[in-house]
Image (cartoon, rainbow, N blue to C red):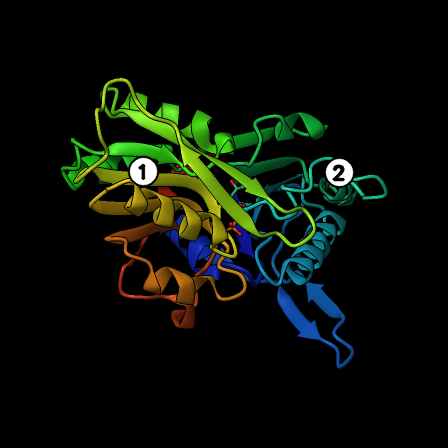
Amino acid sequence: MKIFSGSANQKLGEKIAKILGTRLCHPEKFVFPDGEERVRILQKVLDQEVVVVEPLSPPVNENFVELLLIVDALRRNGAKKVTAVIPYLGYQRQDRMFRRGEAVSLLVVIKALEAVGVSRVITFDLHSIKIPEFFKIPVSHLSAVPLFAEKIKEMGLSGAILVAPDMGAVRRIKQLSEKLEGMPFTAIEKSRDLATGAVVSERINKLSSVKSFKNKTAIIVDDMISGGGTIVKAVELLKNEGFEKIFVFATHAVFSQNAPALLREIPVERVFVTDTIFVPREKRFSKLEILSVAQIIAENL
Ligand code: R5P
């Protein structure tokens, strides 16, 4: 099996290849002055099973087109099967028409992946568990929840309360709670202005087993941090409720706009993300810790 990587997350590709005892292959890449990209496969792939690692992280459209070109080139060179490891599936939040006149962008992405010849997709912590059903090809929907559970145990945070920053995150929080001997969990009611993207964290659900949140530790768990608005608003609300310490766990460090700057300033102990998306040096900050999903991917190839 040959492992290829596009440009979006070569470090993750290297880790996966190392675990599997092989070397990472790089397609030859050339960018024309007008921005068009040309890729070329130099290795022999005839009749082979091939893996391509490429999250659809920012710059989303460039990474997406690059992935399509690599898969097309692999197929034209005779690859028998192409597994696309897309640890972060961009466009997943546009999985339906929210307002009249919109495109269902995720379906466009899926059709394109299937059209160029992707045989299987491996991805992590999708926004909705229905998304794999939109594909005609097999999708392995993996999760960073076991990694988070391990870390929480390692840090000895047994008296903490898990917090879903919105109702969509409750399913994941329940899974994590099960792995942590039934750690209590609650959820924040959040709303978002569809036109501007502004987030409002309205209230936190009370827990019958917990009289007050005063001096407690909260562990916020979400699928992704994009612009950071969800986490910033959740932390504000939790602090107002009396929580003393707050830890943040999120699978995908999309870190768009000024998210790293916002996260640097909020009163949290640590922010844990995974390497489904490569976080460049300029977006890292002292409270940030990156956990690797490479082992989970290698075990599922
Ligand atoms: C939304 O439902 C997701 O689960 C995340 O909470 C959201 O996408 C995070 O985005 P942002 O960081 O821009 O608030």
Q: Quadrant of residue 23?
A: bottom left
Q: Is residue 43 above or below residue 51?
A: below
- Residue drawn at x 43%, y 67% is 280
Residue type pointed to by label 2: Leu
- Residue drawn at x 39%, y 49% is 274
Nearer the observer, 170 or 9: 170
Percent position of residue 19, x then y: 36, 46
Q: Is residue 212 above or below residue 292?
A: above
Q: Which mark is residue 82?
A: none
Q: Residues within 10 Å of mark 2 (few under 14, many from 20)?
A: some
Residue type pointed to by label 1: Leu
**Relative to 193, is 259 on the left or the right?**
left
Q: Which mark is residue 147?
A: 1
Nearer the observer, 202 or 74: 202
Percent position of residue 47, x then y: 66, 41
In the rendered image, is residue 113 in sight?
A: yes
According to the image, label 2 marks what residue?
Answer: 107
Q: Residues within 10 Å of mark 1 (few under 14, many from 20)?
A: some
**Relative to 155, is 249 on the left or the right?**
right
